Image (cartoon, grey):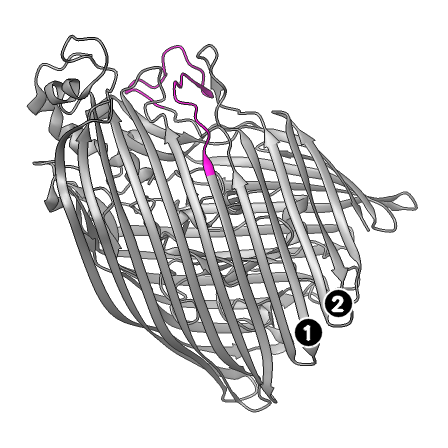
Amino acid sequence: MHVTNYRTLIIPLRATVALPLIALASVAAAQTPAPADPAADPNEIIVTAAKRSENLQSVPISVSAITGDALSKSRVTQVDELVTKIPNLQLTSTVGDNTPIFALRGVSMSDYSLNQASPVATYYDEVYKGNFALLGVALFDLERVEVLRGPQGTLYGKNTTGGAVNLISRAPKLHEASGYLNIGYGNYNRTDLNGAVNIPLGDTLALRVAGTFARADGWFKNVLPGKPDLASVREYAVRGSLLFEPTAGVRFVLRAATSYQNPRNYGIYAQPEAVVRPGLGRRQIAANVTDRRIAKTTSVSLTGNIDVARGLTLTSITSWDKGRLKFYEDTDGQAIQLLEIPYVDRATQIAQDLRLTSNFDGPFNFIIGAYYNREKVFNQTTFEIGKDIDSDGLPGATANDCAIGFPLGCLFDNSFDQLKRSYAGYTDVNFKATDRLTLRGGVRFTNDTGQQTNFRSDALGPDHVLVVNLIPLSSLRFKTNNVSGKVGVDYKLGHGNMVYANYSRGYRARSFNAQAFFDPSELSVAQPEAVDAYEVGAKTQFLDRRVTLNVAAFYYGYKNQQFINISPLTGAQTLENIPKSRIMGGEAELTARVSPALTLRAGLGLLDAKIKQGIVSGVDVAGHTLSNAPKLTFNGGIDATLIDGPAGKVSAHADVAYASSQYFEVINIPRLQQKAYALLSGHLDWESRNHRFNASLWGKNLTDHFYFTSRVDLLAGFGFDYNHVSTPRTYGVTAGVKF
């Protein structure tokens, strides 16, 4: 490759070098499939979305819940796949499997750097997992998943401007020796093994050990001779839980978990301006970088609940997390070395949540608590640009090639340490003014501090010899105090139905720019985001509770969304804010038990998300659509029992998920728009009469639909668009036993 005019190339290169990192770096009703316990009420799901155990239909917030059994039977093995089950939930998977970046009701991230935290928070058993390196493999042996829509700034705190996703694992049970084992095989030579065992250890102790293991060949076919296919699966996870109940009203659960992933990394669908990539099929790649992606997590948490007095429970959640994420991306998706990016992300976190919850018989109840979180991150990113280009005419790629061909033939490497601390105090109260009318409110005060230290950026030769220091050793700091809260009212109608209205404010903490590579002026700190949300909704059941219909409508004022701004004049990359956006829409979810043998499910999400004021990379984006915000999402399903006799029960389950067109960036480049698409999935199940044995034939994306899950414009600087593509059709069989 020969470059005749460096000045004409450097600005578009600098303007697009950051973009891979940007892209890489309702009230909903429960979907209520038949519960595992045959004696359980099929019309009722208990959730802890409001930090209390309550019937989902009694919780006056926008929340969906899906049981762990339903997820297992539907072969939902990655958190990413939840988007096919929840209206107005989207995600971008630029960091790989099991590290989703959720968007909920149009609230999303526009900077995907590995040091950032999503505005839709992810919790495992009430423990916040902020950094990507802490997520790991978690979707196994679950009691349920809860998705809370709207700002959760009171009980959940910062980084929940869009909402929260809670994964609740199955806890040990006293006096019960039980377990299960599932084995599966599918296309791409996929092998699955998962199970759990519950062991009583006397009258006060019980142990539960659960695990999962999966391997599969890559589905992104590499056409280069001798090179492996990409997007494989190779992972395991183990979780141990110890329950201790020394006396009535005292309960402790100690959890320890680890997970490890080392598959061949995802592949990049690098698309030139022409629609068709020369010589490559849709799921083919010519990748010269095929390193394994490493993701390792370790976590320990202790949850204690003590009834300190009649109607008063003290809850303590103490946690420690450690994670490492490392992968080498073939960004150009070609058999050249035009653009390749190694990433390193290491994180440790300790957190403590302490709260007092009342459950009085009278009209007034409360939650009052305090929270602390300390997160330490190391981040390193290297842009390898044309490192195979020979600029000096001498054998070997050296620092001299970088010095002559700059920026071609160079490795641009930045690294830094990041330390964030958060202190918070919060309260949530409710007052039953009458038998039907309840007034609710809450407030949270948060003190956040952050330090970005040891930041430096260097230009290196392909031999890793220093050419020039671009940003000398630097440090940044911030300190923020924030007040968020919620007020609301709900009114109980007849037959257990309810209507509600609320206002809430959410807060996403300030963030450091990880995309500073070329100049000290790029070092920047974004202002905090805020969402003011207004919502009304209704939760209803009728026809003897066989039909559940929940609806909601909302309006958001979205302020200071964080994004990477690239100067069209200098190519400088700074982390800034989009001043104003507005989002409005609604959800409806329906579950209808037509008969004991037939259940219908449907969910609808409507969204209108527009920017009101903002300039991004020199473009006035007022009136543009926010990213990851399709106007319409729909999911539906049928659960039908076909045979129920002495030989067992045979049931069929079909699902459809639809999303209208959407953008993955706020400039709304027409060629990067993802068109509307629908996905079909299903499973055919058999369960023995005594419920001990089961088997399933399953399939996902049955029509093998091809669509994009992330898109970035790199055309000006590198000659291609950067794309992540969907998983193809997968299918297989699973057999299990309970004991």
Splitting the image into 4 quarters, where does residue 361 fall? bottom right
Q: Which mark is residue 245?
A: 1
Question: Which span of residues is magenta-colored?
Answer: 270-294
Judged from this view, the residue extending furthest toward the bottom is: 362
Left or right, 164 with respect to 670, comes to right
Q: Which mark is residue 605?
A: none
Q: Which type of secondary structure does the marked residue at label 2 adopt?
A: loop
The structure residue drawn at horizontal position 33% and vertical position 22%, both measured from the top left corner, is 271
Eyeballing the image, is 252 above or below 301?
Answer: below
Q: In this view of the protein, which residue sits in the foreground, 262 or 545?
A: 262
Left or right, 627 with respect to 234, comes to left
Left or right, 683 with respect to 326, comes to right
x then y, percent, for residue 384:
26, 26
x then y, percent, for residue 90:
44, 46
The structure residue drawn at horizontal position 15% and vertical position 8%, both measured from the top left corner, is 393
x then y, percent, for residue 344:
35, 39
Q: Name the residue under label 2.
A: 174
Give the residue type that dot 1 points to. Glu
Magenta stretch contains residue 675? no
Q: Is residue 560 in view from this perspective?
A: no
Q: In this view of the protein, which residue sits in the foreground, 322 or 570?
A: 322
Q: Which type of secondary structure does the marked residue at label 1 adopt?
A: strand
